[in-house]
């Protein structure tokens, strides 16, 4: 049974990017913008997309609050 489980897991390509469209273009764009970590341009676009299509009030509220936090100016940490 262990061999069957190992075989089943090896057939599924986890953690592999599927390059089927404009992925390289978008990746190059994020590098050009200088923000390749989370909470960047494409995160906001995804949140907008989900919010427009979301049917749940809690989903829309969460995304609205998150977007406000992302767009708010960040405070610099002060040394005391």
Image (cartoon, helix red, strand yellow):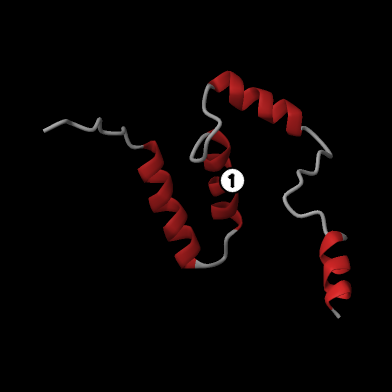
Q: Position of residue 35 (x, y in %)?
A: 52, 28
Vertical placement of residue 36 versus 11, above or below? above
Q: Closest to the observer: 46 or 23?
A: 23
Residue 70 higher or lower than 9, as above or below: above
Residue 55 position (above or below residue 2): above
Q: Residue furthest bottom?
A: 1
Position in image of residue 58 (x %, y %)? 45, 66
**In the picture provided, is 27 more to the left or to the right than 34?**
right
Q: Position of residue 72 (x, y in %)?
A: 33, 37
Q: Which residue is mark 1?
A: 46
Indicate the position of residue 47 as horizontal and vertical percent values: 54, 48
Q: Secondary structure at mark 1?
A: helix
- Residue extending furthest left? 80
Q: How many marks?
A: 1
What residue is rendered at 31% in x and 32% in y?
Answer: 73
Residue at the image position 43 percent from the left and 45 percent from the top: 67
Q: Is residue 19 left or right of residue 57?
A: right
Viewer-proximal residue among 34 and 57: 34
In this rendering, position of residue 29 left or right of residue 7? left
Q: Which residue is located at x 58 percent, y 53 percent?
A: 50
Q: Residue at x 88, y 73 (%)?
A: 3
Left of 25 or right of it: where is 68? left
């Amino acid at each position: 049974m262990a061999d069957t489980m190992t075989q089943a897991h090896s057939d599924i390509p986890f953690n592999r990017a599927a390059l089927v469209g404009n992925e390289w273009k978008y990746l190059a764009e994020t590098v050009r913008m200088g923000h390749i970590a989370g909470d960047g341009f494409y995160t906001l676009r995804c949140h907008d997309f989900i919010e427009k299509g979301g049917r749940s009030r809690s989903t829309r509220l969460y995304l609205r609050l998150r977007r406000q936090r992302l767009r708010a100016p960040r405070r610099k940490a002060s040394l005391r």
